[in-house]
């Protein structure tokens, strides 16, 4: 049940130069959200920017009735969001979309979470669900540089094994996260892949998964207007022609379902 | 005070003057969770074509100042799918359903109109103005002669109330409206989107896959109001106004300028309950002003 | 890296591609305190007529979403006053001065053009698009034939570079541009304002004294960009683009779409230093991208 | 010298249901401003609302380098302004326009300040200047109801005599402020009139001043785009035809100069 709600902000904390962690009261969403789902946030009461901003649910606390959003300030909407302070009210619509499909069988009891940059956002709630289901979970997390890496402690606190890469080698191994994954798989390890990050990364990962015949779920981004399946703006090509819609068919797709 | 919100668009009676605009409310069903669809004046469904259409290549949407560009390219599952999958549900929900149709040829429009002569369809809206389909759209809506031809042809193929939706990308909107009226339109709806473009200075490419797209949202409201007002001076058939309506106040502005009803477009994306809020807001305004019927507002602008 | 910002508009050499738009920067002198007027690509002064004009009755301005409507009605002290009072000051300040002229008849345009053949005037901009003056404006700019006639006539009366400024309120902007080019225009500038309207639901009256007015500001940028791009495909003469430019990024978008220079309009009201900031911002972009001359940007959009 | 400046907000205090008092650091404006002048405030970094908001300078403290603005939340811009908090920065352009002409001769040593509603805004700085010039100053202040009346104490602190009227009689005498003025003049008193308020009030006052042959200066409002004399948007009709411009010829005009 998607509901529009106006929640009170509990905190809005700057974690790095561009990354912020927002906690907001949204009891219904906190109860219902599944890993990989997103919300549409309205960051202003005026008409510029006009559209809502899609943000993954980073974490949720059904008991306290709060959700966490992790966002990067890249443009007007996310900048405006970073101006919100405790006690202010925020208009949120969600939970939206089809999230990650959690592994059920025993053969999938290894999960490889692969996150590039702000692609880390949906991974924490996913990790929380996986760990609760006794799935052994490993996070491979790549970013540009050490100071861009956030929330590693939150994953470790859940008992997730974390391995990192940075483009400049300032934290973890030097290189990108798909190479990190390839190296890891080299050692004979396996598991189902759950990935989120920039499209070039997801594309590389898609090939790798195909090559190694591994199941992979990709969380995609697209420009969205409605987030409700009504505008048909968020098209992603599918093999053989035609399009699916990121907001309702996704944002999470099986790697073979989409053409990036 | 109980106010009367009902209006008529030719032979079509609406319980209130607030409809949702084609392409911005899906098939209504996507918004079922936000309110009672049967309580709306009507739902104009996504532009429907004879054959299914995949639509344009992404990126299809970009935000602009107080507006958005879209180049969806009429993605839709085709008229047959609509009739078998969506129409029965809409009928069951008691929705006043108006079908927006788009064709590449006059013949396609006529075929569509015939197929859509179905119980549960309250009216047809002829989309002769979609700017995104190179083969059709633009050309139909920008020439008086062609508008006359297509409307006259479709008129012969349907008994349903026929609403003709105009493109704003023309020099003389009143002349186009008169052509549609002369050809037998029961009502005129306007405006469709303004043709626009957006550019990414980092990639030095157009942002939309289709290069150009249609501009909608609050940014275009002043243009839409002006055109509704001009058309209201030019034709006798009822007008359905749209373009940037976000609030009841916006909707009332269109009514004052001469619209008998309005459609809510991009606002549905921003706030999915907009249509219901606008209905309530109009009722509140009438109460406050002591006006018994919304029909008294229509065209009552004092110059 | 020192980047080259100079561009040419026909025979007119500009030190950079950033001018200020007619009616939005007064006679430049009002903005002297915010920067060196001589450092601008040029200043296009307020629309000038043969006789002084009092302008339209108030209310003349209203804000709209990310835009504004104006119905100033070409208030100006007339060409003689301009020549005796403002031109000498502009000349002394080393301003590249372009005069925007508006007439009610072809003959008035020609008389104006002759009177403006003066040292210190760098070029003329023919305003055939002002939507506010019932007797002139609109009619000239919306018909290919009339555009051809007025441009051809004025062409015979001036040796100054002749820029023709187009109205966006037309079906086919490219055709109008071609007519202006064929008649001898040295450059095309666009867009003037979109015709719009605003309504007060409390008084149930139009907000503007003139009922309708011209829409400008960021709201119209997508339409302006599209038209500049269309005209760039249609003509060989240089184009000066405008409509909603607030930042260097906006200006670069117009250059990429085919404009050789840009004009800053409503942005001057919001931030009076905009024109200078845009010049600096373009230079910065060129440096960052390692592009030696701004001329390399012109029309370089990759489709 | 008009300058655009970005000042830090010292305080933004709600005085009544709709009236707020904003204090902002703007040393150059504080030094230069004359009573009746205004500033153009940019209330957002986005494009909606697009234009700046004209506000009279309510008070200034050249020593501390601050100015005060007194504003009423009537629409989007003024609502947004009320969201500003201490320490936030505000973009201000000013001082703008031609303010009140202060009386010089001995015969004008009585000043009658007439304010309707938010027309009280420019009166405090005017009163400060008048009192500093030993002009005996009286404020006639009308508002809808008692709770809409603000800043009376600030005037009294300067030594100004204050008389009030409210539409509902909840404070001072019942009636409008022009009637209050007429009553006061009835008693044979005189003085130069300095007025600010809604146009109908100024119109009534204009007739009264003409009748009684009193000098009156009126501070007008108009829709403005630039505030700099460039857009010609802020036209006010003058007797005999044609227009003046509120932003540069005014906002303060002699009563006989303008047609309301
Ligand atoms: C389902 C979904 C979940 C998302 N989850 C998160 C999240 O948890 N945290 C987070 O920081 N971001 C997330 N995003 C991306 C986020 O929505 C955009 O960064 C944001 O909308 C940018 O808005 P802006 O106005 O700040 O930037 P803009 O000024 O609009 O754009 C700045 C830059 O971001 C790019 N961009 C803007 N919108 C999108 C978009 N919808 N998809 C891809 N690129 C875009 C633009 O191309 C541009 O380069 C998600 C997007 C989707 C579709
Ligand atoms: C020189 C000058 C000095 C001013 N000083 C003050 C002041 O010290 N304190 C104060 O509270 N207000 C002052 N005003 C009025 C103030 O500028 C407007 O109230 C404000 O711009 C309204 O903006 P908004 O977006 O909040 O309201 P909007 O949504 O724009 O309008 C709300 C209502 O206010 C009216 N309005 C809006 N702008 C103006 C305007 N420029 N002139 C007249 N009516 C308008 C509208 O018609 C509408 O009824 C002054 C105006 C001028 C021209
Ligand atoms: C995403 C999107 C899709 C649209 N699809 C259609 C369509 O299929 N048929 C049509 O006639 N109009 C279509 N329109 C135009 C709207 O119905 C409406 O005329 C226009 O958006 C102006 O109204 P607004 O400013 O309220 O959105 C579409 C608009 C948008 C934003
Ligand atoms: C207040 C105002 C007055 C204008 N006066 C003129 C004019 O006299 N002549 C003219 O050709 N254009 C005039 N214009 C149009 C502008 O020059 C420009 O074409 C238009 O505003 C679009 O640019 P912008 O969106 O950057 O403002 C005026 C615009 C405004 C806002
Ligand atoms: S965002 Fe509208 S359909 Fe997906
Ligand atoms: S507000 Fe622009 S001239 Fe007065």
Image: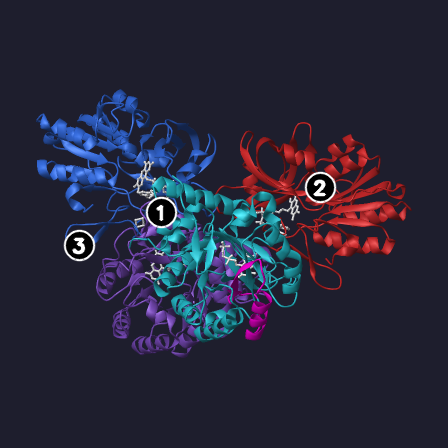
Chain colours: A blue, B purple, C cyan, D red
Residues under numbered marks 1 and 3 in contact, where contact means CB atoms less than 8 Å apart: no
Q: Residue at x 44, y 65 (%)?
A: B240
Q: Dot 3 corresponds to which residue? A: A241
Disc 1 packing (10 Å; few <14; some 14–19; many ≥20): some
> Which residue reaches farthest front?
C119
| Residue A205 visible within the image | yes
Q: Residues within 10 Å of mark 3 (few under 14, many from 20)?
A: few
Residue B201 - label: 1
Disc 3 sits on a residue from what chain? A
Give the distance between the C-alpha atoms of the residues marked 1 and 3, in whole angstroms: 30 Å
Name the quadrant containing residue A107: top left
Read off the residue under disc 2: D122
Question: Are tags 1 and 3 found on a single chain?
Answer: no
> Both on one chain, marks 2 and 3?
no
Q: How far across and down, in percent of the image, does residue A34 sit?
A: 27, 36
Tell which of C179 and A228 is nearer to you.
C179
Q: Which residues are magenta?
A: C103-132
- Do the residues marked 1 and 2 share a common chain? no
Q: CA distance from mark 2 to mark 3?
A: 67 Å
Ligand 2 within 8 Å of disc 2? The answer is yes
Q: Chain of mark 2?
A: D
Task: Give x and y (percent) for residue D80.
Answer: 54, 41
Q: Count the labels in the image.
A: 3
């Amino acid at each position: 049940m998607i509901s529009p709600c106006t929640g009170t902000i509990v905190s809005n904390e700057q974690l790095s130069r561009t990354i912020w962690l927002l906690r907001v009261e949204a009891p219904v969403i906190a109860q219902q959200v599944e890993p990989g789902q997103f919300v549409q946030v309205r960051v202003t009461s005026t008409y510029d920017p006009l559209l809502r901003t899609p943000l993954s649910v980073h974490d949720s606390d059904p008991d306290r009735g709060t959700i966490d959003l992790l966002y990067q300030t890249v443009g007007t909407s996310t900048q405006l969001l970073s101006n919100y302070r405790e006690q202010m009210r925020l208009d949120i619509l969600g939970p939206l979309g089809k999230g990650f499909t959690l592994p059920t069988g025993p053969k999938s009891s290894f999960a490889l979470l692969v996150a590039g940059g702000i692609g880390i956002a949906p991974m924490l709630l996913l990790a929380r669900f996986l760990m609760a289901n006794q799935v052994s979970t490993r996070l491979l997390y790549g970013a540009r540089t050490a100071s861009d890496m956030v929330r590693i402690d939150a994953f470790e606190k859940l008992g997730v094994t974390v391995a990192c890469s940075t483009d400049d080698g300032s934290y973890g191994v030097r290189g990108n996260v798909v190479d990190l994954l390839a190296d890891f798989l080299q050692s004979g390890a396996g598991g189902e892949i759950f990935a989120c990050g920039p499209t070039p990364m997801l594309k590389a990962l898609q090939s790798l998964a195909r090559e190694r015949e591994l199941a992979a779920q990709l969380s995609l981004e697209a420009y969205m207007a409605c987030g409700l399946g009504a505008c048909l703006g968020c098209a992603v090509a599918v093999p053989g022609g035609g399009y699916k819609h990121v907001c309702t068919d996704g944002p999470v797709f099986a790697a073979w379902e989409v053409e990036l | 005070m109980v106010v009367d919100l009902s209006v008529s668009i030719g032979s079509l009676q609406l319980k209130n003057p607030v409809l949702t605009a084609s392409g911005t409310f899906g098939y209504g069903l996507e918004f079922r969770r936000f309110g009672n669809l049967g309580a709306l004046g009507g739902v104009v469904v996504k532009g429907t074509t004879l054959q299914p259409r995949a639509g344009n290549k992404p990126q299809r949407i970009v935000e602009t100042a107080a507006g958005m560009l879209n180049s969806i390219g009429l993605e839709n599952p085709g008229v047959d799918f609509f009739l078998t999958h969506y129409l029965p549900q809409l009928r069951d929900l008691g929705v006043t359903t108006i079908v927006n149709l788009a064709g590449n040829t006059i013949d396609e429009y006529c075929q569509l109109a015939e197929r859509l002569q179905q119980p549960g369809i309250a009216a047809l809206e002829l989309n002769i103005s979609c700017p995104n389909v190179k083969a059709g759209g633009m050309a139909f809506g920008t020439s008086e002669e062609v508008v006359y031809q297509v409307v006259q042809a479709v008129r012969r193929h349907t008994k349903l109330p026929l609403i003709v939706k105009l493109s704003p990308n023309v020099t003389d909107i009143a002349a186009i409206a008169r052509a549609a009226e002369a050809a037998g339109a029961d009502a005129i709806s306007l405006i469709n989107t303004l043709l626009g473009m957006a550019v990414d200075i980092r990639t030095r490419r157009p942002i939309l896959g289709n290069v150009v797209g249609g501009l909608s949202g609050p940014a275009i409201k002043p243009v839409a109001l002006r055109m509704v007002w001009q058309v209201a001076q030019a034709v006798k058939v009822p007008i359905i106004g749209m373009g940037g309506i976000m609030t009841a106040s916006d909707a009332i502005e269109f009514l004052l300028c001469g619209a008998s009803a309005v459609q809510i477009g991009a606002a549905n994306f921003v706030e999915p309950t907009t249509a219901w809020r606008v209905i309530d807001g109009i009722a509140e305004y009438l109460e406050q002003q002591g006006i018994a019927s919304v029909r008294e507002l229509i065209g009552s602008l004092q110059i």
